[in-house]
Amino acid sequence: MKIKQTMIMGCLGANMTLLFAGGAQAAASYCSVAGSPNPDGLSFSDMTFNGNNADDCYGVVAGNDNTGINGLNLTWGTDWTFLTKDDAPGEVANGSGSFEGFSFALAADAGTSGSWTLTATDENGAAPPNLPAYFDFVGVLKASDRYGLWYFEDAKVEVNNTGTFSIHFVNKGGNFPDLSHLSLYIRTGDDPGNELPEPGSLALLSLGLLGLGALRRNRK
């Protein structure tokens, strides 16, 4: 009985400490966890790229992403390269960076939601790679003292690219904060149209061809 009372009092004490510290914050989690909505209200559609929702999202994380995101040990990998950041939303594009022979310019709207653009320029002439190209991206929306991350796998990048964002996590006052900055992290992606078939698919194809050959022989 004393053990149960001690556990209950300990839990109450921990909860009260969080409340007095300015409100309990849920642990960061993935949007892709089945049957478990993100506790901070994040969703795949909170950030889009060229009309496509994110493949996954994660958050919300306290602090700033200026030390990089590889230390988060994301299931999306830890080989991300910082590309660029727009830290003055609503102004002329001020985020620039380069990766694998391409230069990029980033601009985002101000406020709790809006649009963002990514312009790509091929700097290596006719030599490959050329646009369109495929990259994996992680987009970071930093607002107040926290940030969320959105993952885009094998995103097709053209010269002019557009996206949207919407901040659905709240600050300590319970309000949706304005965007502080939008960061992009990048790595090499794959062209989905050039992916090799799975071994199982190859086996089925072989069986189908064998069956077709046997059918033709029988007809003769």
Image: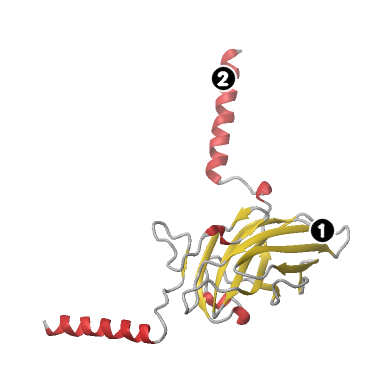
Within-10-Å neighbours for mark 2: few <14, some 14–19, many 20+ = few
Compare residues 44 and 200 and report the one nearer the observer.
Answer: 44
Q: Residue at x 58, y 81 (%)?
A: 64
Within-10-Å neighbours for mark 1: few <14, some 14–19, many 20+ = few
Q: Residue at x 54, y 58 (%)?
A: 44
Mark 2–mark 1 Cα distance, whole angstroms, equals 45 Å
Quadrant position of residue 93: bottom right
Quarter holding the C terminus?
top right
Image location (x, y in percent) of residue 58: 51, 67
The answer to whether the residue labelled 2 contacts the one labelled 1, judged by CB atoms less than 8 Å apart, is no
Image location (x, y in percent) of residue 110: 67, 70
State whether residue 32 is above or below residue 73: above
Q: What amino acid type should be assigned to the residue bearing mark 1?
A: Pro
Residue identified by numbered label 1? 128
Question: N-terminal of the two: label 2 or label 1?
Answer: 1
| Mark drawn on residue 112 | none
Q: What amino acid type should be assigned to the residue bearing mark 2?
A: Leu
Tell me: 217 left or right of 127: left
Q: How many marks?
A: 2
Image location (x, y in percent) of residue 181: 65, 75
Compare residues 209 and 23 and report the one nearer the observer.
Answer: 23
Viewer-side label of 2, 1:
1
Tell me: 54 left or right of 11: right
Q: Tag 2's secondary structure?
A: helix
Q: Residue furthest right?
A: 125
Q: Residue at x 40, y 80 (%)?
A: 23
Q: Residue at x 76, y 56 (%)?
A: 158
Q: Residue furthest left?
A: 1
Q: Tag 1's secondary structure?
A: loop
Residue identified by numbered label 2? 215
Image location (x, y in percent) of residue 141: 60, 71
